Image (spheres, rainbow, N blue to C red):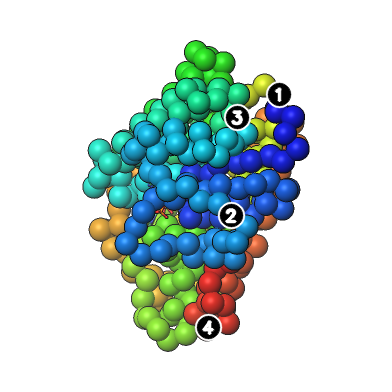
């Protein structure tokens, strides 16, 4: 660690679900937080609208090396959290090269920027349980071999290993969090949990009659995003960088998520959910469930929100949003 009294963090992906929770978390701990944001024709700061006057921004893109060098040079962060990615698995089948450029090579661009400008910076890489894919053991640990099942999963495996490689080659304090699925009211509407919570509420309010979904048998280890950003920070506070699985240790099917979400608004999910094969994937990840004992031991980190509580939190937030009681998701 440096001896600067105020810690400064650079977050890529600050406009995303995790970026918004991490920004809040770090601001609460007295950090100065800089978000790297890419240019778009409409502003998409909805998840961080409540933090705008406490954040700094740097315009950049994971596809553009110089913008990352400049972000590091200009803001001199002590910690960099690389959360930006093309993060939607389904899209990665349709846009595999873009996914590779962003989610895989983008990691190397950031590591090179750090290596060249200030190798003392601590680096967090957002690795994923998607890397386990067609799982070789149950539950999955830090030692479980990778077998990715999508261009996204393959890109994340690259991002993971290049992080390990820069740590071993150049002595960077660089680590990866192998995070299992984590959700929240700020989750993008295309991901299955939010699609279900939002869809169930729309049906309950008479704004829709059915919800079209794909594979209901897939099992995921779902936690709360607000808990998981704490684990990211804890990883960067270790004296020696190390990679961790971050999970709840419980797994549930998409069907169970439907059941719990529709029950929260007093509906029977079976009367409204329609199977649509366009939401099936060319290759599926059937079962994810992690073993988080290393994180519990070394980081003293445990999840605080259980499955039913998470589903109800998401449904309640969508109800408030769609009834007009909430103006935005913060
Ligand atoms: P998210 O909501 O989809 O946010 C992705 C972020 O990346 C957005 O801020 C997006 O910016 C930014 N981004 C995309 N392409 C970019 C580019 N070329 N240059 C700069 N920024 C770019 O994802 P999330 O759920 O917060 O996940 C955060 C990270 O953790 C991702 O790397 C994801 O793959 C990984 N992860 C997530 C989970 C999970 O369950 N949530 C689990 C394991 C790992 P725009 O707003 O401009 O699109
Ligand atoms: N998105 C979506 N939409 N998924 C559906 C649907 C649907 O209509 N119907 C069924 N599913 C199934 C998918 O086939 C998958 O098995 C499961 O629901 C979860 O899909 P997503 O919510 O899209 O998440 P994911 O598990 O593919 O990926 C998320 O978690 C990864 C960590 O394991 C993303 O956040 C990734 O970025 C993250 O790395």
> Mark 1 vs mark 2: which is more N-terminal?
2
Q: Which mark is residue 55?
A: 2
Please tell me whether mark 4 or mark 1 is closer to you in this view: 1
Quadrant of the image for the C terminus? Answer: bottom right
Which residue lies under the disc numbered 4? Answer: 324
Local crowd size for mark 3, using a 10 Å CA cut-off: few (<14), some (14–19), many (≥20): many
Label 2 vs label 4: CA separation? 27 Å
> Mark 1 vs mark 3: which is more N-terminal?
3
Residue toward you, 8 or 291: 8
Above or below residue 210? Residue 181 is above
Question: The residue tagged with tag 4: helix, strand or loop?
Answer: loop
Coordinates of residue 94 in the picture (x, y in percent): 24, 47
Instruction: Kindly tell me whether residue 78 is visible in this rendering.
Output: yes
Coordinates of residue 307 in the picture (x, y in percent): 61, 57
Quadrant of the image for the N terminus? Answer: top right
> Mark 3 vs mark 2: which is more N-terminal?
2
Question: The residue tagged with tag 2: helix, strand or loop?
Answer: strand
Local crowd size for mark 4, using a 10 Å CA cut-off: few (<14), some (14–19), many (≥20): few
- Residue at (67% x, 55% y) in the render: 305
Coordinates of residue 234 in the picture (x, y in percent): 69, 37
Left or right position of 26 against 133 = right
Instruction: Kindly tell me whether residue 253 is visible in this rendering.
Output: no
Above or below residue 305? Residue 248 is above
Residue toward you, 121 or 99: 121
Query: How many dots with numbers?
Result: 4
């Amino acid at each position: 660690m440096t001896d600067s009294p105020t810690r400064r963090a650079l977050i890529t992906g600050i406009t995303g679900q995790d970026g918004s929770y991490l920004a809040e978390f770090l601001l609460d701990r007295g950090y100065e937080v800089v978000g790297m944001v890419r240019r778009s024709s409409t502003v998409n700061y909805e998840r961080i609208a409540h933090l705008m006057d406490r954040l700094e921004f740097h315009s950049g893109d994971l596809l553009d090396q110089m913008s990352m060098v400049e972000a590091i040079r200009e803001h001199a962060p002590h910690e960099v959290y690389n959360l930006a990615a093309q993060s939607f698995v389904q899209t990665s089948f349709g846009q595999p090269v873009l996914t590779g450029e962003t989610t895989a090579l983008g990691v190397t661009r950031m590591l090179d920027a750090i290596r060249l400008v200030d190798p003392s910076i601590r680096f967090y890489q957002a690795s994923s349980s998607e890397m386990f894919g067609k799982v070789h053991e149950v539950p999955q640990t830090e030692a479980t071999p990778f077998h990715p099942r999508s261009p996204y999963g393959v890109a994340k495996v690259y991002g993971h290993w290049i992080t390990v490689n820069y740590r071993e080659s150049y002595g960077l304090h660089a680590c990866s969090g192998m995070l299992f699925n984590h959700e929240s009211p700020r989750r993008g509407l295309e991901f299955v949990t939010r699609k279900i919570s939002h869809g169930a509420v729309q049906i309950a309010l008479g704004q829709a009659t059915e919800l079209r979904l794909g594979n209901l048998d897939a099992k995921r280890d779902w936690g709360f995003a607000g808990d998981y950003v704490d684990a990211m920070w804890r990883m960067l506070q270790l004296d020696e960088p190390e990679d961790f699985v971050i999970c709840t240790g419980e797994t549930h099917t998409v069907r169970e998520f439907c059941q719990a979400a529709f029950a929260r608004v007093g509906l029977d999910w079976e009367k409204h959910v329609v199977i649509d094969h366009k939401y099936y994937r060319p290759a599926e990840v059937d079962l994810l469930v992690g073993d988080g004992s290393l994180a519990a031991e070394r980081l003293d980190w445990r999840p605080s929100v259980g499955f039913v509580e998470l589903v109800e939190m998401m449904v309640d937030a969508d109800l408030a949003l769609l009834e007009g009681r909430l103006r935005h998701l913060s």
